[in-house]
Amino acid sequence: MSTGQARVPAFRVPTWRELVATPQGLLRALRVWPPYRFAGIRVEHIAPDWSEAVVSLGLHPTTRNYVGTQFGGSLFSMTDPFFMLLLLHQLGSDYVVWDQRGEIEFVRPGRTRVQARMTLDPAAVEEIRAAAASGDKVLRWFETEIVDTAGEVVARVRRQLYVRLKPTTGS
């Protein structure tokens, strides 16, 4: 090798941000993320356009509560932080997006595998973008149902997101 040539490494380890920058990358990362993996939560799908995420929770000895049904904390956890992640990717890096608040209503005991489908309506995304254009904070609720294998509602979850346009620098 001559002295004027730069050496190009054969392999570069991607950064965490690079790994989770695509729906498939985030899906793979969340499938091995310890809080979900050890809680029995499985991320089934993240839409290529960041409009939907599907998450499930199996009923196993480690996911059951004292009376043998799905543990309520796991039901709530399986919906966190998907609305935030979906909206963050839909809006882009010019926005701050945080989970602000969450609520769960337990409807019936979960006695089987359960699933939650979190979906972002494109019209809602555009409403948020327009409302945040002034730089003011926007608070918006998103809802999903957790259903069992028979399609029966086990719980209803609401999550409030905080959205604000990042201030521009050097204007």
Image: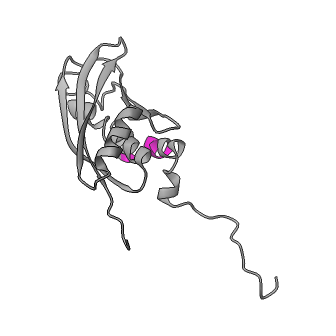
Tell me the residue at 52%/56% (across/down).
Answer: 18
Q: Quadrant of the N terminus?
A: bottom right
Residue 38 can be seen, yes or no: no
The picture quadrant where one finds residue 7 is: bottom right
Closer-to-camera residue (122/70): 122
In the picture, measured across the screen, residue 138 lies left or right of residue 18, that is left
Q: Position of residue 104 (x, y in %)?
A: 19, 30
Residue 63 can be seen, yes or no: yes
Q: Quadrant of the C terminus?
A: bottom left
Tell me the residue at 36%/26% (across/down).
Answer: 58
Q: Position of residue 162 (x, y in %)?
A: 25, 47
Q: Position of residue 134 (x, y in %)?
A: 28, 54
Magenta extent: 28-34
Tell me the residue at 52%/46% (across/down).
Answer: 22
Query: Does the magenta segment cover residue 72?
Result: no
In the picture, measured across the screen, residue 37 lies left or right of residue 104, that is right
